[in-house]
Amino acid sequence: MNYMDHFETMDMVMMMKEEYRFRFQVHKVEEADDEYESRDVTVFARIFNDKKDLVHEGLFRVRFNTIGIYPSPADVGRQIYSKHLQRLLLMELKRYIKPQRKYLSPGDYKPVW
């Protein structure tokens, strides 16, 4: 295999990956009752592809405390089968919760859309 074949193969891989858009909404926040004063957030997520078709929607749990933000890989793995989309969703859940964590108090949240 020469360099040109390798480049064409890489180009083909890049074209196969889709871009996704994520819409998130906090559904519920609960105290986790652990030594780190963690809270569990249930997030409703909608995932759209680049053609604006709904790919998936579901509830995902995210635990956060003063140390960090931890989306539940079990929830993501149970609902999403694409490894690429799993990694993207875990990253986007962290990005969504991070600016809100000091404002998320326990309780149920009503839908905004």
Image (tube, rainbow, N blue to C red):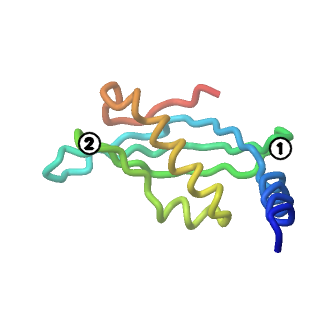
Q: Is residue 47 left or right of residue 39?
A: right
Residue beneath the point at 56% across and 55% down: 87
Give x and y (percent) for residue 59: 55, 50
Tag shown at residue 53: 1
Residue beneath the point at 69% across and 38% down: 21
Answer few, some or many: residues within 10 Å of disc 2's Cα (few below 14, many 20 plus, some between 14 and 19).
some
Residue extending farthest to the bottom is 1
Q: In the structure shown, which secondary structural element does the residue marked by tag 1 occupy? A: loop
Of residues 84 and 31, the one nearer the viewer is: 84
Residue extending farthest to the front is 2
Of residues 86 and 46, the one nearer the viewer is: 86
Q: Name the residue that disc number 2 marks.
A: 65
Give x and y (percent) for residue 86: 59, 57
Quadrant for residue 20, please give it: top right
Answer few, some or many: residues within 10 Å of disc 1's Cα (few below 14, many 20 plus, some between 14 and 19).
few
Of residues 21 and 63, the one nearer the viewer is: 21
